[in-house]
Image (cartoon, coloured by chain):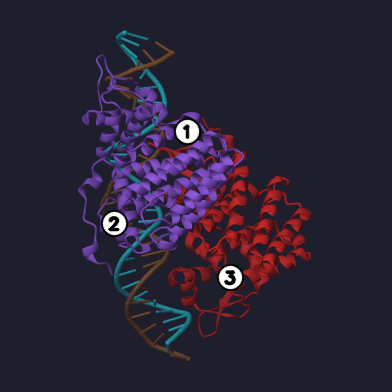
Chain colours: A red, B purple, C cyan, D brown
Amino acid sequence: MENPALSTQKDENLRSINPLQAELSHQLIALFIREGLTTGSALSERELAEKLSVSRSPIRAALKLLEHFQVVEPRPGGGMRLAMDSPALMRVEMTLPESPQDQLYVQIGQDRVQGQLEEHVTEADLLRRYDVPKALLTKVLTQLVSEGLLQKAQGKGWLFTRLIGCVESNKDSYELRRIIEPAAIRSAGFQPEPERFQACLAMHKQLVDGLVFETPHHALLNINAGFHQMLADFSGNRYFSEIIRQHNRMRRFTESGAVLYPERMLQSCQEHLDILEQIEARDFEWAATLMERHLGISSKGQLGVPE
Amino acid sequence: MENPALSTQKDENLRSINPLQAELSHQLIALFIREGLTTGSALSERELAEKLSVSRSPIRAALKLLEHFQVVEPRPGGGMRLAMDSPALMRVEMTLPESPQDQLYVQIGQDRVQGQLEEHVTEADLLRRYDVPKALLTKVLTQLVSEGLLQKAQGKGWLFTRLIGCVESNKDSYELRRIIEPAAIRSAGFQPEPERFQACLAMHKQLVDGLVFETPHHALLNINAGFHQMLADFSGNRYFSEIIRQHNRMRRFTESGAVLYPERMLQSCQEHLDILEQIEARDFEWAATLMERHLGISSKGQLGVPE
DNA sequence: ACTGGTTTTTATCTTAATAAAAAAACCACA
DNA sequence: TGTGGTTTTTTTATTAAGATAAAAACCAGT
């Protein structure tokens, strides 16, 4: 019934870290970068808690974790302060532990994409395969469900939606985005948020200027997803945002292992930049047209080129 | 913190019925109608189980339930046979018990739309409010999450997405559908399934012919949702289908209590029929244009007029 | 009126044993 | 080979109590 050689090895790390703390440590770093904090900036526990919509307890724990990684340090007189600048933060962020939930989530997603999991699975199968506590599995399944990647079968077991793990799915996804994204830009409610827009514009100028060749894979994918997400958010229509968010999430599985061709990435960034400049000039119609072209080209492009 | 006067009354029925059986009894009736079975048709347990993707055990239980409602009757020599024709089935279907899960699901959704539930709720709040077993609540929350109506907050509690329960949401939903539905019809993969299409066409002809004035509220909403769902399905793009499915689900909350104006319903059915006739003539481009117009009119129409 | 530190309260997670239900296998019969 | 009936196996649901972690309230110091 199941090939034991394919079974994923037990991973003791899957049990070790408090998921909320791990998640918050990542979010805190993203926050520090976003707010442009520099070495020595004082960090107010209450303010951080407020910004991330949690109470001070988990913030304190996450700061403790960051202290262990020397991202923050105790401040004389109490509290913490930042101990790094943004470039260092970006580097450290990748070495931070992932929550056990995230590990299992990515594992299951990739196993499914690689065909090591059938379309129909039972919880008991998964528990045997991954050897994790049942509660953790339940949480991950819930997460997959919330993202539309999995659904409960009638009776017993779970079904992966055919949204994931098949070739046609990718084509369909592009067709949808080619419709939604230009429509978002043309939407009556389209309204760029100045700071967010400028940050994205500046980043793309640097990338086109050559930074693209030095930026790690993982970061390029994030920037790319962020560009498309931002434009969808600017539409002011929650559904547009939500759809793009979901498709960005799915691309994590299919593209995280893909090869990126540097010259293609440069061209892609240039196209992004062209679109951003039209938006800055408030020619939304032309920006939308460029987006249609951008997505049209990409979908026919080589495997592994994300837009 | 919470106004006890607003608290929903305990409903003992919420605990009584096996959810899968209840769900299957509805699905069986839908199946009988869809397949055009008539009084006396023999029912094969294995065949039904196969068609609904479950094993024979729950099918047997559901048939027992249907026997109690005299929908089916024992056949001499063993097994069951259908004891009603389609019109009677449709009438009975509405009187069948709903699963406790569905009851709670609708209750929570409506309470949220009506503002009796805050955007942020904790499980403990909900357990106190509805007095249901924790496991049932968990299942319903999972369902709401899978439909994108609810999400887990960081730390404790749950957040209703602002997709539901606010005025703008409705506007956004129409904007999205005005983009997706015509695009589905124009999609290169658009391909009507003959039987399904003909059934829908015939139904609309009857409605326009006057049946609309005799059809109950609940059935009209279903026909309406089914029309839009069908066209999205014909696109062959899963994402289009999935998006329309989600929006139809949300409309259950906002529209199930709405007043339907008969003359407006007639006009709506006529518009549907026009679209269907263009599709039959294979002028998909014009059908898509009519759909744009149809959705454009509806969104400006009176409250409670669903499309 | 802030801050970080601390305590108290509350909510959720974990757990494991048991019960319930679905799936699968088996049967005899047409 | 198909049927319904029955039994066996496997999976999942249900609990309740205790452990854990988040939220909230409360400090004292600046």
In this view of the protein, which residue sits in the foreground, D11 or B56?
B56
Q: Looking at the image, is mark 2 or mark 1 nearer the viewer?
A: 1
Q: Dot 1 surroundings within 10 Å: few (below 14), some, or many (20 or more)?
A: some
The residue carrying mark 2 is: B127
Q: Earlier in the sequence, mark 2 or mark 1?
A: 2
Residue type (three-letter) at the residue carrying disc 1 = Phe
Residue type (three-letter) at the residue carrying disc 3 = Glu
Q: Position of residue A1 (x, y in %)?
A: 51, 30
Count of numbered tags: 3
Q: Given the image, what chain letter belongs to the residue carrying mark 3?
A: A
Q: Dot 3 surroundings within 10 Å: few (below 14), some, or many (20 or more)?
A: few
Tell me: A305 left or right of B142: right
Q: Looking at the image, is mark 2 or mark 3 nearer the viewer?
A: 3
Check residue B197 in the rendering and tell me which mark sits there, or answer none: 1
Check residue A193 in the rendering and tell me which mark sits there, or answer none: 3
Check residue B251 in the rendering and tell me which mark sits there, or answer none: none
Task: Give the answer, above or below, for where A32 lies relative to A181.
Answer: below
Q: Are marks 1 and 3 in contact (CB under 8 Å)?
A: no
Query: Do badges 2 and 3 share one subunit?
Result: no
State the separation of the CA atoms marked 2 and 3. Answer: 40 Å
